[in-house]
Image (cartoon, rainbow, N blue to C red):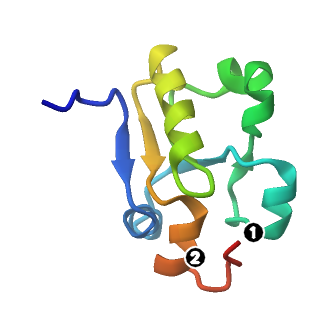
Amino acid sequence: MEQKKPFKEATPREIKERLDAGEKLTLIDVREPQEVMTAAIDGAKEYPLSQAMSWIDTLPKDEELVIFCHHGGRSAQVAMALAQRGHDNVTNMTGGIDQWSQQVDPSVLQY
């Protein structure tokens, strides 16, 4: 039996629908700066995974955090770490910015 994750997961399309509906979501991009220069989601905050120890404990616990990376693996690690630090409103965006480009905004470059 698969163990329940301590964070939620949502597709890029689901996140976009929630944003369009006016929900307040804080998008956290955990990719590295050179990746963000290649492709980015407007309004997302940049927190490179390589520097996580300097920022992970500074993220607000009173906002829903949507964590994303290129495909969803690194963001799942960050979502898990945040859940272990007491964040109870964390969502991993499955498929990352790659799926965002395919499902939501084709102007976002795929790499």
Task: Give residue 1's position: percent from left, percent from top.
Answer: 12, 30
Q: Amino acid at mark 1?
A: Ala
Nearer-the-camera pick, 86 or 101: 101
Eyeballing the image, is 82 above or below 21?
above
Q: Which picture quadrant has residue 90?
A: top left
Q: Which residue is mark 1?
A: 39
Eyeballing the image, is 65 above or below 6?
below
Residue under the image location 40 percent in, 25 percent down: 88
Q: Which residue is mark 2?
A: 101
- Farthest residue in the top direction? 85
State yes or no: discs 1 and 2 in contact (Cβ < 8 Å): yes
Residue under the image location 19 percent in, 32 percent down: 2
Q: Residues within 10 Å of mark 1 (few under 14, many from 20)?
A: some
At mark 1, the secondary structure is: loop
- Farthest residue in the front direction? 1
Task: Give residue 87's position: percent from left, percent from top.
Answer: 47, 23
